[in-house]
Image (spheres, grey):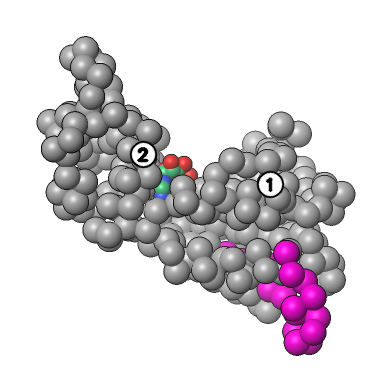
């Protein structure tokens, strides 16, 4: 459902099996987010405070949102998502209030995961010259920091931030007790692309002679979102030729098409 300024999903369907090529990142996020939610007593016994939030960083379309939703699914947690740029551009003057309400909701709905996409839009390094627009951004950031700090023993609400501009983030956000785990979500390598192709072709009917290895080789430089688009396009080519199975040639044409859109900045990739 959608409450003013935030998107709430009671039960995301994505699982870790839907996330390709990010095995190490899954292990890290399980330790930092899942374990404190499912086994808080472990941290008590050892006498350390669990990580409160993790920050995922990397290029767009590599699976940050997907991974965060999968964590919510695997922990039976509610998933609350806000987009940093919307907080300060779409809901002008209300960013700080929305952040406050977001945390209130998360506590009420716990166990829950707060996902803040494009966190750089509110968490960029504070500059010297402050215009009125910046002031709004700053107020929103101050509220976010206050809420992160006011969270001390709330083991059942976890925060996941995402950005593709970690270089401009305010170091205040990265202090211990805030986003104290930082996980890189990189572009997939050939193995990663192969597992992402396996995931997205799982329910497709494809010709027997299709070698996904070969297709992974042909898609160097492409990310998960591109691969998903390629599979859909390949299916469309088959439908257009009134075939029920997707051929290797359909995939080749789809790679060209998606690669072309990509280079020309079209589609949902940008
Ligand atoms: P953005 O920074 O633009 O929000 P993101 O990193 O959050 O991007 P997603 O929104 O998670 O990327 O990816 C878009 C879609 O691309 C996913 O819903 C999924 O279908 C596909 N996808 C991306 N990465 C992966 C992956 N590692 N494994 C499987 N599918 C992926």
Residue at image position (63%, 70%) is 32
Q: In this view, does 152 lie above or below 254?
A: below
Q: In this view, does 4 lie to the left or right of 267?
A: right
Label 2 environment density (alpha carbons within 10 Å; few <14, some 14–19, many ≥20): few
**The image quarter in which residue 246 lies:** top left
Residue 244 falls inside the magenta stretch: no
Position in image of residue 262 (x %, y %): 27, 40
Q: What element carries label 1?
A: strand
Which quadrant, please, contains the N terminus?
top right
How many numbered discs? 2
Q: In this view, does 41 lie to the left or right of 14?
A: right
The residue tagged 1 is: 79
Q: Is mark 2 on a helix, strand or loop?
A: loop
Q: Is residue 226 above or below residue 206?
A: below
* Extreme residue toward the bottom, this view: 46
Residue span colored magenta: 38-55
Q: Which of 78 and 182 is in front in this view?
A: 78
Position in image of residue 75 (x %, y %): 68, 55
Q: Is residue 172 above or below residue 102?
A: below
Q: Does the residue labelled 2 lie within 8 Å of ligand 1?
A: no
The residue tagged 2 is: 202
Q: Nearer the viewer, residue 68 or 260?
A: 68
Q: Which of marks 2 and 1 is in front?
A: 2
Label 1 environment density (alpha carbons within 10 Å; few <14, some 14–19, many ≥20): many
Residue at image position (46%, 57%) is 164
Residue at image position (72%, 51%) is 77
Which quadrant, please, contains the C terminus?
top left
Position in image of residue 202 (x %, y %): 36, 39
């Amino acid at each position: 459902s959608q409450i003013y300024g935030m998107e709430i999903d009671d039960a995301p369907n994505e699982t870790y099996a839907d996330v390709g090529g990010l095995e190490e990142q899954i292990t890290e996020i399980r330790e930092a987010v899942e374990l404190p939610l499912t086994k808080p007593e472990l941290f008590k016994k050892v006498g350390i405070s669990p990580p409160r939030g993790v920050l995922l960083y990397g290029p767009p379309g590599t699976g940050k949102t997907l991974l965060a939703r999968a964590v919510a699914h695997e922990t039976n947690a509610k998933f609350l998502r806000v987009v940093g740029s919307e907080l300060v551009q779409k809901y002008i003057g209300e960013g700080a209030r929305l952040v406050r309400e977001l945390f209130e909701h998360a506590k009420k709905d716990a166990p829950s995961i707060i996902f803040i996409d494009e966190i750089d839009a509110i968490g960029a390094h504070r500059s010297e010259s402050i215009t009125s627009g910046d002031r709004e951004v700053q107020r929103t950031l101050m509220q976010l920091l206050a809420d992160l700090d006011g969270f001390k023993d709330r083991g059942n609400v976890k925060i996941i931030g995402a950005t593709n501009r970690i270089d401009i983030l305010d170091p205040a956000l990265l202090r211990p007790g805030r986003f104290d785990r930082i996980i890189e979500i990189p572009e997939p390598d050939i193995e990663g692309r192969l597992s992402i192709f396996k995931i997205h072709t799982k329910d497709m009917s494809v010709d027997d002679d299709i070698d996904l290895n070969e297709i992974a080789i042909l898609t160097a430089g492409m990310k998960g979102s591109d691969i998903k688009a390629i599979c859909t396009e390949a299916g469309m080519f088959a439908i257009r030729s009134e075939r029920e199975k997707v051929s290797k040639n359909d995939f080749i044409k789809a790679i060209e098409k998606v690669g072309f859109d990509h280079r020309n900045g079209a589609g949902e990739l940008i």
